[in-house]
Image (spheres, rainbow, N blue to C red):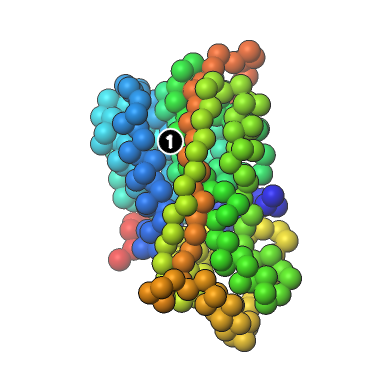
Amino acid sequence: MNQITPGEVARSFSKAAKTYDAAAFFQRIAGERLYERLDYFKLEPKSIVDLGCGTGVFTRELSQRFTQAQVTGVDIAEGMIQWCQQQSSAERYLCADAMTLPFPDNSVDLIFSNLAIQWVNDLSALFQELNRVLRPDGLLLFTTLGPDSLKELKQSFAEVDHYQHVNDFIDMHHVGDAMLNSQLSDPVVDAEAVVISYDKALELMRDLKDIGAHNIDSRRNSGLMGPNKLKAVEKAYRQFAMSDGKLPATYELIYGHAFGTEMKKVTDYHEYIVELAEGKREP
């Protein structure tokens, strides 16, 4: 299980706002496949939340698809929200923690979340909060990562030193259990392996840094890795080379969906919202 603080997540992804889209190849694939799953449901949502919206790519797509809906992109990273606000004014963007969302009970018809919930330590508490804001029969649709994600990189690092260099991810069955514990209705999870190929392991590590998804676990070694260790990791990674010589980066992509239920206890929603000053987009 990761030992990650919300502050670390916010700082890491804020720094990556300007480099994210160019490096987020896998993240775009996952989001597109999740977006396609909307076709399985008959939806006429009036209130949509894109949770962990990042640079707002799918926030904008949701806004274009559901033109009558109020679409809100939510991200814990202030830098991401500032970037989104510079790209589009058609949607609303809020800087907020997924664990304490600034929405009333039973107020959201659709929560769409692509590769965000793996950064939360307590999934049961998260799903309870999402159930709180979902209307009864409102839809939660998400992707996250399973423990086989980046297994080649993890093993390559393990052959070089004993530090943790790759984030841990939770098993699909535990994700399903957490949804059940939160009283969400009819939870479903499934998974597939997605392989992205690279010429060098260093390119993968650079992409992870550029999207803010490098190792931010508190157990990591905070020092810089020297060139000799990087060469050793590169050499160890070659054992996984495919027939064309490319290096695979495997992601265990988990999909989940569930529906909101009538909450037994109505709670006060969290009123605080971080207001961000509008800035000019840099060239």
Asked if residue 126 is positioned above or below residue 210 in the image, the reply reads: above
Image quadrant in which the C terminus is located = bottom left
- Give the labeled residue for mark 1: 112
Front position in the image: 4 or 282: 4
Going 50% across and 38% down the picture, which residue do you hit? 190
Residue that sits furthest to the bottom in the current view: 228
Compared across the picture, whether 278 is left or right of 179 comes to: left
Front position in the image: 168 or 271: 168
Residue 12, given in percent of the width and then of the height, sits at 55, 59
Residue 118 seen? yes
Q: Quadrant location of residue 268?
A: top right
Asked if residue 220 is positioned above or below residue 236 in the image, the reply reads: above
Picture mark count? 1
Residue that sits furthest to the front in the current view: 243
Residue density around tag 1, few if under 14, some if 14–19, many if 20 or more, within 10 Å: many
Residue 151, given in percent of the width and then of the height, sits at 58, 61
Please name the amino acid that badge 1 sits on: Phe
Front position in the image: 230 or 265: 230
Dot 1: what SS?
A: strand
Asked if residue 162 is positioned above or below residue 67 in the image, the reply reads: below
Residue 37, given in percent of the width and then of the height, sits at 36, 35
Residue 271 seen? no
Going 41% across and 67% down the picture, which residue do you hit? 197
